Image (spheres, rainbow, N blue to C red):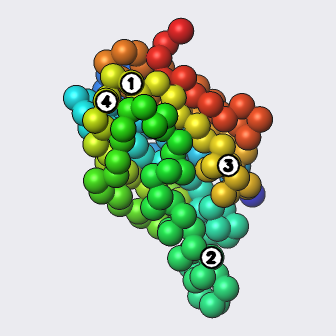
Amino acid sequence: MSRSPLSLPVIMLACLPITGLAEDMDSHAAHQHGMAQLTLVLEKNTVQIALESPADNIVGFEHAATKPGEKAAVAAAISTLSQPALLGLNTEAGCSKTTTRIKKMLATPERSAHRDIEVSHTLSCSQPDKLKQLDASALFKAFPRMQSLKVEFALPAGQGSVILTPAAPLATLVRG
Ligand SMILES: [Zn+2]
C-alpha cells in the first residue's frame, strides 16, 4: 500500500533550518497512508497553514473519481477541508480565514498511482500573539483514516515540530 516511510526529499527538508519553512511550504513530504503533514507559519498577523495528505486518508481511494459515490466523496471532503474550524486554532488569537486553496488528487512526485490532497489556508488574526495552540481532534474525527499528523510551526514566539495523533491531538505552538 504505502511506500518507504522516508523518501529523500523529506530527509533533505528535515535538515533545513525551520526559518526556511515559509519558502518550503510547497515542498512535498513523504506519501505514507495514515500520515499527513501540516505546516503553520505566522508572520505579523497572517497565518499560513498548509495541510498535505495522501488522498487515501481523506477519501479512501487515490484513483480518479469516476463513480457518482466517489465524486460525492471528493466533493464532501473538499467542503470539509475548506472549513478553517477544522484546524482548531485557539480562539483567543481571533483568526479568520481570508483564502483557501485546495489541490485535489495531485500526482505524487514519483508519478506513481498514489495521489495527494493539499489544502492551503491563509488566515488573518486580530491577536496573533495569543496564537498558542492547534487542536487537530476535529480533523482526526472527520478523517479517521488519518492516524498521525506531523505539525511544523514557525511563530515569533517559537518554532518546532510535533507529531499529533487521535489520542494526542493538541499541539502547543511554543517551544517549551
Ligand atoms: Zn497512496
Cα separation, mark 1 vs mark 2, equals 36 Å
Q: Residue 68, relative to residue 77: is it above or below?
A: below
Residue count near mark 1 (Cα–Cα under 10 Å), binned few <14, some 14–19, many ≥20: some
Residue 20's spot in the image, x, y percent?
31, 27
Cα separation, mark 2 vs mark 3, equals 17 Å
Numbered disc in front, either 3 or 4? 4
Name the residue type under label 2: Ala
Residue that numbered label 1 is attached to: 130
Element type at marker 4? Answer: loop
Circle nearer the N terminus (3, 4): 4
Residue that numbered label 2 is attached to: 73
Circle nearer the N terminus (4, 2): 2
Element type at marker 2? Answer: helix
Q: Identify which residue is drawn at 60% across, 82% down.
A: 72
Residue 122's spot in the image, x, y percent?
32, 48
Q: Identify which residue is drawn at 41% across, 62% down.
A: 102
Q: Residue 159, relative to residue 137: is it above or below?
A: above
Q: How many marks?
A: 4
Name the residue type under label 4: Gln
Q: Residue 7, relative to residue 74: is it above or below?
A: above
Element type at marker 1? Answer: helix
Q: Identify which residue is drawn at 73% across, 55% down.
A: 145
Circle nearer the N terminus (1, 3): 1
Left or right of 113 in this view: 158: left
Cα separation, mark 4 vs mark 2, equals 36 Å
